[in-house]
Amino acid sequence: MTAPIAFQTRRQRWLELARDVSAAACLRGDFVLSSSGPSVEYIDKYLFETRPTILRRLAALMAESVDSTVDRLAGRELGAVPLVTALSLETGLPFVIVRSGRNPHVVGELHSGERVLLIEDVIMTGAQAITTLDTLTARGADTTGVLAAIDRGDGGGQNLSAAGHHVEALFTYADLQKGTDHDNNR
Amino acid sequence: MTTIAEALEEIQKASAAERSAVPAAVEIVGSALAEQLKAKGATAIVVRDDIDDAVLAHVVGRELGVDIIRVYEEEGLLTLAPEPAPGTRAVLLANHWDAPARLQALRLLLAHHQTSLVAVAALVSSDALAALSDVDTVVA
């Protein structure tokens, strides 16, 4: 008699989550993106970040990529706050929120020399992530890179790498479109 | 402060010190920009949702007697408010254009709304502005 399958593999969980994120947040319509102009596709991060069943699983999978040397997480207001909060709960690591705009600053406790990992929801051009990392560095943080839920593939990953930052994303936009993965067989 | 050059210097000093632009200086430079833009036949000034750009747009728009349309950037999406009417002839205006990609995105946004771009204007020249070869540019 074959034993029932009680647990999903990581890959099964990843594929199922890709499908759920795609179904919840990948919209088709008439959009103009600040990164690349008119588009018929847009990822509305709030449509996946406001669903606990998705947010919980995102945090669980992303937590596997949080290096054990990280002291603190960081998330940029407003979009990354639900995600960084979920990851904080999952990992037990404290976090700060980075406020953007004309007067960027860090809110929450942050000590000079702490190793800080920036959590991003969707990477587009990477410009905002670079600005956020600069804000953290100016406050004395030793930034370890960027961990994102989705890399939209608008050059953001390359721009961040070119600026000297380590970048990792749980999904690419292509992953969400296809629901498949080429190298995510951990 | 009576000349355009003096007014520009005041604005640039304020910007470097992260202070709000000097209203009297913006009046002088904005009026001069409007004078140059009169011949373009613009029916709207399109400006980013930025406080300094908004002050400049107010002066230029008032002098030209045209509407102001704001560009909002939120969560990676660009939107115009109010929506341009059909046949709108727009001037893209900013204190300073610093990122060619950002300027290109705004041009695509206007084209998406079937709005004609009659000029791109700024207080001072920049590489992003100088790189434009297919549209008129105006600097104070």
Image: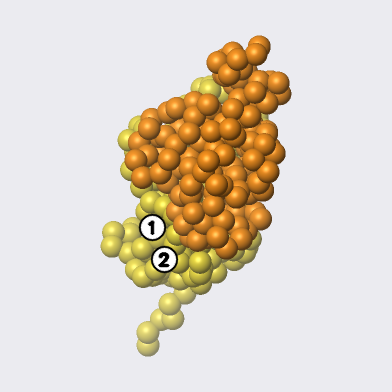
Chain colours: A yellow, B orange
Q: Chain of mark 1?
A: A
- Indicate the quadrant where residue A178 lies: bottom left
- Classify B91 as above or below B33: below
Q: Which mark is residue A79?
A: none
Q: Residue at x 58, y 32 (%)?
A: B35
For residue A31, say whether it is visible: yes
**Relative image position of residue A53 (x, y in whole percent):** 59, 66
Q: Chain of mark 2?
A: A
**Relative image position of residue A58 (x, y in whole percent):** 51, 58
* Residue picked out by circle 2: A176
Q: Amino acid at mark 1?
A: Thr
Q: Amino acid at mark 2?
A: Leu
Q: Residue furthest left?
A: A182
- Classify A22 as above or below A36: below
Task: Say which quadrant the C terminus of chain A sits in.
Answer: bottom left
**Relative image position of residue B92 (x, y in whole percent):** 53, 43
Q: Residue furthest bottom?
A: A1
Q: CA distance from mark 2 to mark 1?
A: 7 Å
Mark 1 and mark 2 in contact (Cβ < 8 Å)? yes
**Relative image position of residue B95 (x, y in whole percent):** 56, 30
Q: Residues within 10 Å of mark 1 (few under 14, many from 20)?
A: some
* Residue picked out by circle 1: A172
- Indicate the quadrant where residue A69 lies: top left
- Classify B21 as above or below A32: above
Q: Residue at x 66, y 20 (%)?
A: B25
- Classify A71 as above or below B112: above
For residue A60, say whether it is visible: no
- Number of numbered labels in the structure image: 2
Q: Residues within 10 Å of mark 2 (few under 14, many from 20)?
A: many
Q: Residue at x 59, y 34 (%)?
A: B34
Q: Regarding mark 1 in the picture, which secondary structure is present there?
A: strand
Task: Say which quadrant the N terminus of chain A sits in.
Answer: bottom left
